[in-house]
Image (spheres, helix red, strand yellow):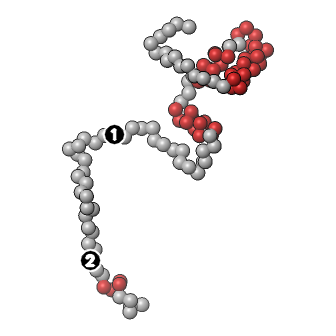
Amino acid sequence: MHTSSRLVTLKIPLPRRDHRVFLAARRILVRIMGAKAPDAIGLIQQYLRGRDARGLADEYLDTVGWPMAGSRTVSLRRRRKVPAAVRPVRSAVPPRVVLPRQRGLMDPTRN
């Protein structure tokens, strides 16, 4: 493999139990693929490569048992920043709305 400035090298501690799963998967693939089977590192790289953010986040939520009732839909679009000159000025006191009284509707003697 050639080194490229586009590659990121990660050093991730992996529990032995999880590492053994990749080793066992390699043994299965050796029986099927022979010499073309990837090693454990190749399997891990293949598992991590080519993922999309939404699918990865959804898989994580499934793994940790996040309830489906909780919101899982998030917009991945960034909010467009509105220039300060265009932003509405917020006052400390909200404006008071005065509604005209309609006596006919509020009269308790009227049925």
User: Which quadrant would residue 38 be assigned to in this image?
Assistant: top right
Residue drawn at point x = 79 percent, y = 14 percent? 31
Q: How many marks?
A: 2
| 27 w.r.t. 66: above or below | above
Q: SS of the residue at dot 1?
A: loop
CB under 8 Å between callouts 1 and 2? no
Task: Please state the horizontal and vertical placement of residue 64, each as a whole percent of the image.
Answer: 62, 40
Q: Nearer the viewer, residue 4 or 75?
A: 4
* 95 sits to left or right of 23: left
Gap between marks 1 and 2 measured at Cα = 39 Å
The three-letter amino acid code for the residue at tag 2 is: Pro
* 98 sits to left or right of 106: left
Q: Which numbered marker is on residue 80?
A: 1
| 80 w.r.t. 25: above or below | below
The three-letter amino acid code for the residue at tag 1 is: Arg
Whichever of callouts 1 and 2 sits on the residue coming sooner in the sequence is 1
Task: Please state the horizontal and vertical placement of residue 32, each as a whole percent of the image.
Answer: 77, 15
Mark 1: few, some, or many residues within 10 Å (few <14, many ≥20)?
few
User: Which quadrant would residue 100 be assigned to in this image?
Assistant: bottom left
Q: Nearer the viewer, residue 49 or 111?
A: 49
| 40 w.r.t. 104: above or below | above
Can you identify the residue that label 2 sits on? 100
Mark 2: few, some, or many residues within 10 Å (few <14, many ≥20)?
few
